[in-house]
Structures are given as C-alpha cells and as structure tokens.
Amino acid sequence: MRYAPPGLCVNDFDLLRHADGTYTVLHLQGPWTAEFDHLRMETSYGRATSADLVHWEPQGTAFGNGLPGRFDQQAVWTMHAFPHGTGMAMLYTAVSGLTPDGWPLQSVGLAYSERTDGTGWRRHGAGPVAEADPRWYRTGERMGWRDPFVVRDDESDGWVMVVCAADVSLPVEVSGCVAWATSDDLEHWTVHPPLVSPGDVDELECPVLERLDDGSWLLLGSIGATRGFEAWTAPRLRGPWTRRGPLGPTGAYAPRVVAAPDGSRVVLHTTPRRVGLTDTGDRCRGMLAQPKSLVVSAGSAPCLEWWPGLETWLGEETYDAPLHAVGHVDVGGRIEVVLRAEDPGNDRAALAVACDGKDLRVTGPGGRVLAQTVLSSLPGALRILTVGEYVEVYADDAFVLTALCYSGRPVPWTAVTGNGASPVPVRPIRLPAPCRDDASAVWPGPTATTAAAAGLR
C-alpha cells in the first residue's frame, strides 16, 4: 500500500513491466533527515519487485555514481529504463559537480544491460549523451537538465526524449519547461527548443509521455512550487500541446504510468513524510503510494480515480477502529467525518475530513487545516483512505486531496451532519508488509494492555 526500503526514503522512480506480468521499480533512495543533501545522500538506485503494484519487496541497490572525474561522479538522479534489443537501455540524470554558487551541473547519461530485470547496467562511454543547449536552455546557475523520459518517435524510426530544463528566454523563477531531443540510436541526440514552456512554472520536473489509445499523447509534469503534477495533451509528439490542469493534488509527485495486472492504465506517484514522524517535522522525501486509475475521456481533462485493484487488500466492513482503513460516505450537505480522537479520555477530533459544498478539507488537532481544495462540482460521495499517517480523499471516486497527520488515536469513524452523528462502516486495509516501516503506526501512548506487555506495570 506504501513502499520504501527499510530505513530509507524513496524519491523519483521508474517502473518496468515484464513479459510475465511482474514489475520492477527503480528509485532514488536516501536516509530520513531534515538536512537532506541530494548530492551526497541520493547517489544510488534502489530496486524492488512486485506482482501486483501493491506488495513490493526490496531487492537492494541496482546502480550508483560513476568513477571520480566522470560526468556522473557527484550524483545520479531520475532515470528511465526501457526494452532495447534483448536487454534494456536506460537514460539517467548525471551530476558532475557544482557551479561556483553551488548549483548542480546536470547532464544525461546512457547505460545498457543484457538483462531485463533492472540490474546489470554498464555505462555507455565516459561522457554524457545529451546536454543542455545554451541557445534555448540555462546551462550554469539555476540550470536544469534532468529526469529524462524516452519514447519511440511517432514521425520516424528514431527516439524522442523529454527532459526537465530551464528556458533561458524566461525569468529564472518561471523558467521551468520540458525540453526535448531526438535520436536515431540513443547515443547521439539533437536538442530542440522547448516542447512545453508554460511561463508560470518554477520547475517542471519528471516529465512522462504516454501514447493514448487514439494515437494522441499525454504529458505529465510535476510542478515544483505546488508539489503536485499536471497534464497536457497533444495530437502528436510535436504538438500543439494543450494544458489540462492539475491531475494530482499537492503531496502527490513524480508520477509514472504503467499497465496494471488487469491491463488498465494506472498512475503511481511518490508522497512525502515528516522528519521525526511528527506533525511539526519538516516535510522530507517519502515513499511510493498505491496505484490510481488513469481516466482519459474524449473532450474531458484526464483524472485519477480509485483503483479497483485495491479491493483484494480490504477486509469486511466493520464499525471498529482500525488504523489502516477505507470508508465511504454519502454527501447530502455539510458533513464532517471524524477519523481519530485526541488522547484517551479526550474525544475531541484529532483528524477529520470535512466537506461544505465544494469546499473539502482535512483537519488535524484543534481543527487546524492540513490540506484543502475547492471541488469543481458538488460531490455525491466521499471515499477516505488512511494508511498510518497518510490520508487520501476521493470525491465521487476522483483523487482530490492528500494529507499527513501523526496525531490522535484511531476511533470508530463518525459522520457529523446537521441531523446529528452516525457511525461510518469501514473496511480494514491488510498491509502487504506489516512489520516494515512502509507506513508508520500512530501510537496513542501506553494503555493497560500495551504497558503490561512492555513490562511497564
């Protein structure tokens, strides 16, 4: 339901779907820390495998920094691996060092493997295969040339690569753009002017291209300032691209699209945690969240919806108070759903989801707003998911809000409306690896049972 290797956090990632229907994730990894130095702590790729995109098993490190003096000596960041011949190819972000003012110098490297499981990589040459062209992109301070994503060109037998870059024609604070380059052989690239340059984005990270069933294209890009991601569509790779707006709420980042076991398209993304696992801790790198269904309808903006594949991880309905649960409530007016209460003896809400017309929010202790959004229409129903500190809210099954809360103790869910309070049935979530720290337990403090078990009485 959530994945991070024990003791580490997950940042940007890539997904491989194998011929036998299983999956591999390659991901950036580093320790939990507030002072996160991505040049010294994010220097290798972790690897994990899954049969269903929910239960992930860590498989160790698959790739790391280059030798001293090489273009990738300082760090290796976001990658994209894909089938090539009987093996695989991988374009990846390389950092050679820093500018005088401390900005990472980025380029794109290439590696091959004779295997298909995400291991066995060998670098192509001692230098990068693609670098920012100063005619169109920043190449020094505040540069960007990272997060490559590669697809087959829809107008030739070659390849198209999109890259996170900085448009040199725009002020630096709004220069985030998607660069693109073409190649016949993956080893020699021609860089072109920006494919998408909105003019109001600081960083447009982790671009992803997906060919849709009608032959058109979907582009997903993460927005640095909002910590969410947006969608663009186009009839062909070269555009014109139409901005479709946010696809994921703030807190959902770095998406990837993959075919689920049932063949449907789903999106996986990262989600943050807080240092020290407290409400006052700084946000830090987090982990991989569970899939959402990608819905693309003609004439409508793409959206993410509840993925039915999660149903097998849910138990029977109960009115108990499981820590990890999914509940469904109808909305006929203003409603507040209380999920957790404060310490024993105090029933004030420590975590709740409230909906008042189109205004939807998640609140913590004292009613403090943890996350909020304004819906485009009045919702008919809410689906709420809690996994440890994580809260997700779906309005009419569309993913619209996510938040973090470490406070309170689980209580039976209660829906409070103008007509009074009523219990909400929930379905407990069966965690794939309950003994691993993929989702932290919100501990309410010692009770008679836990204290006795710990020898405190």
Image (spheres, grey):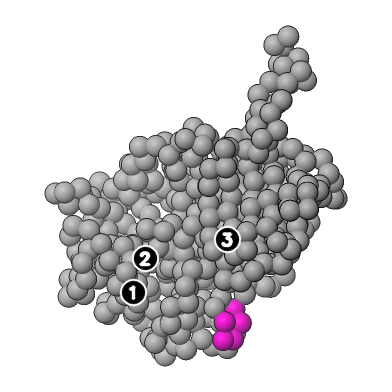
The x, y position of residue 319, in whole percent, is 83, 44
Span highlighted in magenta in the image: 296-300
The x, y position of residue 413, in whole percent, is 75, 45
Q: Are discs 1 and 3 less than 8 Å apart at CB? A: no
Q: Amino acid at mark 3?
A: Asp
Q: Amino acid at mark 2?
A: Leu
Magenta region, main secondary structure: loop
Q: Classify residue 284 by image quadrant.
A: top left
Q: Amino acid at mark 1?
A: Pro
* In-image side of 203 versus 102 (left or right): right
Give the label on residue 359, or none.
3
Could you give the CA–CA distance between mark 3 and mark 2, rounded to whole angstroms?
A: 28 Å
Residue lying farthest to the front in this orientation: 418
Q: Can you say whether 447 is above or below 162 in the image?
A: above
Earlier in the chain: of badge 1 and badge 2, it is 1
For label 2, the residue is 204
Residue shown at 54%/88% (left/top)?
215
The x, y position of residue 108, in whole percent, is 32, 64
Q: Is residue 18 visible?
A: no
